[in-house]
Image (cartoon, helix red, strand yellow):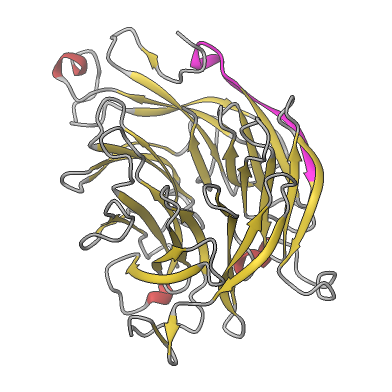
Amino acid sequence: MDASQAVFNNSLGQASTYPILAASFRSLSLFLLAFTYVPNDPSVNAHTNHSSPNHFCHISLVHQTNTTLGPHQYIALNARRDRAYTTTWGWPPVLSAWDIARELQLEHWRVGHINDVPITATSSYITLAQGSGDEPYTYAYSMGGPTGEVHAIDSVTGGFKQKLQEVLFVGSEELEAADKTRKALREGSHAIEFLTSSIPRLAFVPVLGTDEQPGTIEVYEHDPATGLLTHRYSAPPPRVGHGHDAEGRSSQANDGPRHVKVHPSGKTLYCVTEHSNRIDIYTIDATSKVPLTYLASHSLMPLRPQESHYRGSTLQFAPSTPRHPAPRAVIATTRGGSLETMGWVGIHRLDDAGVFQGEPRYHELPSSGGKSLALAAMSKPGDEDKTWVLLSDDAEDAGGVSVLEWDHETDALEELATWRGEAGVDMQGSSFSVWLD
């Protein structure tokens, strides 16, 4: 079997294993995990000691880095998924590059440290983008608080090279005194996503903002030859009047844009707002002086009287499949503002153009989610009508990495397996996790 193929059959010939890379806010390590999927089939279940339906799947530890570079907030991958790039809440702030040794047998896979680069302020998200050459990914873009940075990627090692640009979200005269710790992520820049199919190429950065200076989505032109970003436009909050948005619903003074994604068509952008708990859609026109125009919005949860008790988190598209090349839905989460307030996952169906279709389907989670509830999605192998959703839960004493199965036909969301640690390994909840196949 090709070592790049991350599916490993067991002796029964029916169970398959899929690799996961996970991080934690409370551990300095990265965790290489294995999700073993066992079909809910009597001929297979007869060989197990499990008796409950759909509980034959499990997650186990393959490798722990035992490094001191964390705690890690976010993980980005290259195209081959044999390099990982992480941010950290540690001090001083750095970005770290990692090698993923993909051996024939999953139990022999390892994650090794390549190098670090210092950055000005603690970064939240990191994203890779292709330049104008042949390499799949040439530049790394990190955003967090008062600054963002662009670094070149070494085409041989996959490690970081020199810094190419620093992007400011405060005035240059304010930078020295600005908070550069993870606390600045509550008000500053938080993520970056690219539209590479347009001319010019665009990049989108959500900035959470404050009540005095409400958050925006900053739009940049991206030069693939140099990797540099040039500011183009600031998209204001989608509201009219005082305390109401474009749909007339009451709203807080600051929505708090936190996470964005670009539809594969390149025509729409989606934004999760942390404070008002919405997922907003914007249309994109790369050639216009106003490249983002607000279109529509959904709540991240069933209506609640105290929206401030929740924190909008993240979003992810349902993966494309041969029968459904356009994402059938966008999946989004919101966290509880306290341990007693449970988080939510929402399934927001989309038409082929990327516009909301029908009402969302919400699923309450068994914990608040803590500071995370990050998502990663892959199509269930052999079944285009189901999606496996990787959920990272940071809730104290209840967090971990879970694999949920979303049924496209019924909108059911079923937990297949959860890993919270094991003997001698205490992850203490998960900040972020990604599929490695």
Is the residue 68 above or below the residue 175 in the image?
Answer: above
Give the residue furthest to the bottom. 242
Residue at left 50%, top 84%?
253
Depth check: 129 or 386 in front? Answer: 129
Residue 186 visible in the snapshot: yes
Residue 331 in the image, given as x and y percentages of width and height: 35, 52
Question: Does 111 lie within the magenta span?
Answer: yes
Q: Which residues are magenta?
A: 101-117
Q: Give percent across and percent down for residue 374.
A: 46, 50
Q: Quadrant of the N terminus?
A: top left
Above or below, 306 against 101 in this view is: below
Q: Nearer the viewer, residue 16 or 384?
A: 384
- The quarter of the picture where residue 124 lies is bottom right
**x, y (%) of residue 392?**
46, 46
Q: Is residue 408 left or right of residue 369?
A: left
Q: Is residue 12 above or below residue 372?
A: above
- Residue at 85% over, 69% down: 176
What residue sits 34% from the left and 45% below the top? Answer: 318
At x 35%, y 11%, the residue is: 10
Q: Quadrant of residue 131?
A: top right
Question: Where in the figure is residue 428, as x and y percent of width and height?
Answer: 53, 44
Would you say residue 75 sits in the magenta stretch? Answer: no
Q: Nearer the viewer, residue 100 or 396?
A: 100
Left-right relation of 404 to 116: left
Q: Nearer the viewer, residue 8 or 315?
A: 315
